[in-house]
Image (spheres, helix red, strand yellow):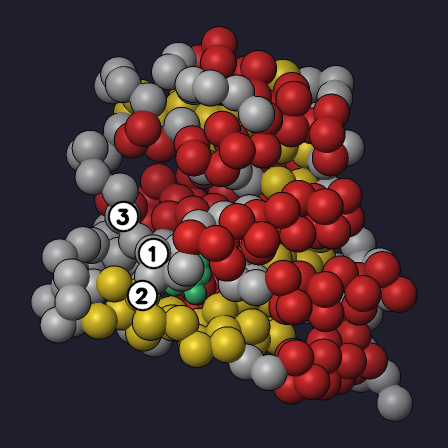
Amino acid sequence: MTTTTQTPVAMTIAGSEATGGAGALADIKTFQALGVSGCLSLTCIVSFDPKNDWGHRVFPIDQQTLADQLEVNTAVYDLDAVKIGMLGSPATIETVASTLMQNKPRNIVLDPVLICKGQEPGAALDTDEALKAKILPLADFVTPNHFESLSLSGMDQISGVEDLEEAAKRIHERSGAAVLAKGGVRLAGPDAVDVFYDGKTLKVLSAPKIGEVAVAGAGCSLAAAVTAELAKGATPLEAAENAKRFVRQGIEARFSSHAPFDSLRQINQTS
Ligand code: PXL
């Protein structure tokens, strides 16, 4: 039996970050704020460690449980878009890749979360290679941060807008996906600069920086907002521009807690 819904539906395939600043909870809050119904296929559970410099403790979900979630979400919904966040291991990547290859949904957005603090460096390397080989080719849209752009483009440095443009082009050539390469606070200067490239249009998206410190949940929320906009029928460039505006407003309205970093607030855009 298939349900039908009026509102677009997006699935996130992501890890939980318990405090809700990042990960699957940020994705679902973003979908909701942008008027899209969300469902979740959970890959792992991350709990920061307040006793150990807020390092990441990562508990993986077993592969059958992940496969079951993917099965039910793809059976119940005609998904309008899918966001892929933290996968965390080569086994998880295999499970996700085989489901998405069997039943390729529209609008797959990849936030290529490469290294998560607290992972074994060796394991992370395997994960990075598997992500590039098996998930990147399935993506319709990819949102690398500065570090991920270096890794995916093979460039030695990205220190200005021209470098970021080159990285976006190389990542598009490698993946075929629309690319939103994010400069964030990692590029010097007064503006937060991102580069959009889809093989035809190259556009630099620029807005004044709000502080020089990264805010938790910004990357997850940006990719989730792109996903929600694509689910609603936006073009890739419109999705990138709307998502950047959403994240900017969310950083302006960020909330603080007892953690040593602030978190983005997802502001409702539907009323
Ligand atoms: O910021 C990337 C990210 C994604 N997904 C999960 C996370 C984090 C960072 O903490 O915990 C689950």
- The answer for how far apart the CA atoms under marks 1 and 3 are is 16 Å
Q: Residues within 10 Å of mark 1 (few under 14, many from 20)?
A: some
Residue that appears at 55% across and 16% down? 165
Q: Is mark 1 within 8 Å of ligand 1?
A: yes
Tag 1: amino acid = Lys
Q: Label for residue 117?
A: 1
Q: Would residue 228 be found to the left or right of residue 163 on screen? A: right
Tag 2: amino acid = His
> Answer yes or no: do the residues labelled 2 and 1 have beta carbons within 8 Å?
yes
Quadrant hosting ligand 1: bottom left
Residue 13 screen position, x and y as percent? 60, 66
Q: Label for residue 215?
A: 3
Residue that appears at 66% across and 44% down? 132
Q: Nearer the viewer, mark 2 or mark 3?
A: 2
- The answer for how far apart the CA atoms under marks 2 and 1 are is 6 Å
Circle nearer the N terminus (2, 1) = 2
In this view, the residue in front, 150 or 263, is 150
Q: Would residue 264 be found to the left or right of residue 97 on screen? A: left
- Which element is circle 3 on? loop
Q: Nearer the viewer, mark 1 or mark 3?
A: 1
Q: Residues within 10 Å of mark 2 (few under 14, many from 20)?
A: some
Q: Image quadrant for the N terminus? A: bottom right
Q: Image quadrant for the C terminus? A: bottom left
- Which element is circle 1 on? loop
Disc 2 marks which residue? 56
The residue furthest top is 162
